Image (cartoon, grey):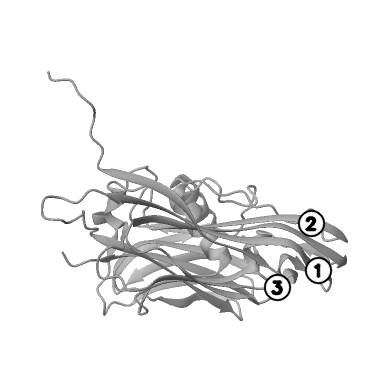
Amino acid sequence: MKSGRIGSNQVRGWRRVQQVALTADNQTFQVDLPRGPAIEESMIIVDGTINVSVAFTTVRGLAPSHYLRRVDWRLNGNITLDALSGVGAYLASGITSRNIDGLTAPASAGTGAKTIRGIWRLPRIFQDMFRPKDSVLKTDENVTTNQLVIQWGQLADFFTGAGTATYTALTMYVMIRDYQEEADNKGFTPRPLYYWKRSEQILAFAATGNNQPFRVNTGNRLRLLLCRFETAGEGADNIITGARILRSGDTRMDLPQPVWQEESRLSGFNFIGAMSGFPGIYVADFGNPGMMGARYSECWPVPSNADVQMLFDVATASTAVRIVTIEGVDLQQ
């Protein structure tokens, strides 16, 4: 056997795209991401300190995520890859990585300086997939704009109650993980087969009752539906007694609340559950039964004219469900 060095055809990098001080409530930033490399992930971090001069009532669950009001990842001005709240982005990343990021919430709602850190990952490849690079964002062809639109809320969003907080040293960082790959003898680099699209909707439950409907806005390959049931914006497990997912006569799920919760945990989402600090979270994953190695072909292919419904048996009124949809969109080859 001939000995020699092992060849390498790609170079990976971690790059800071933007760093800016946050100095006021309700700021919006349009961040241009690089074009040229293949992007595996973008990440947003807010880090630093704030000062509470008039005490609030309590610190909210998942507190830093409420401060990120919305993030949109837009390609060429007319393709939306992500449209999520901070809470939705935080949970959607943990669902596919099987690893929830640690948030640094204010230590209390009382007066004084508070250290905070929020992390929101927007992966273009999912580590629990076979051939994860099949969904990498290729930016060296047919990409004119590649942008994140980041909308921040108010410092009061960290808390409940009426208090006063001011900015002291709070910084927003935006980074990407990318790689450059060697072209073949025709000058082409490998092409992705599909891309992931993440979106979010909130359904309010004004009254109790069975089979309260929600239409899932999809027409592609449905990977999973993540639901967080909420009372006044906080996760809760007493809102529903059961749920169903169906399309025409095709029923994909029909489970009572305790069984759905345990099935979500058994599917690999072990941070889910009332005892783990993440109450109210339930998942229906059509592409992965709990392994590290899902196949894109096993996602639920939903025709564009289909009508996918979620039906909820609601036991507690004046509540809501936050629904994050992750779907794959086939690319023409």
Local SS, label 1: strand
Q: Nearer the viewer, residue 17 or 72?
A: 17
Q: Amino acid at mark 2?
A: Lys
Instruction: Name the residue tied to disc 3.
Output: 154
Local crowd size for mark 1, using a 10 Å CA cut-off: few (<14), some (14–19), many (≥20): many
Percent of width and height locating residue 56: 83, 67
Local crowd size for mark 3, using a 10 Å CA cut-off: few (<14), some (14–19), many (≥20): some
Q: Is residue 226 above or below residue 129?
A: below
Instruction: Report the side of 183 relative to 117 (left or right).
Output: left
Percent of width and height locating residue 105: 71, 55
The Cα–Cα distance between marks 1 and 3, rounded to whole angstroms, is 9 Å
**Residue 115 can be seen in this image:** yes
Which quadrant holds the N terminus? top left
Q: Is residue 239 above or below residue 43?
A: below
Percent of width and height locating residue 37: 33, 57
Instruction: Name the residue tied to disc 1.
Output: 165
The residue that appears at 61% across and 80% down in the rendered structure is 207
Instruction: Name the residue tied to disc 2.
Output: 114
Q: Quadrant of residue 228?
A: bottom right
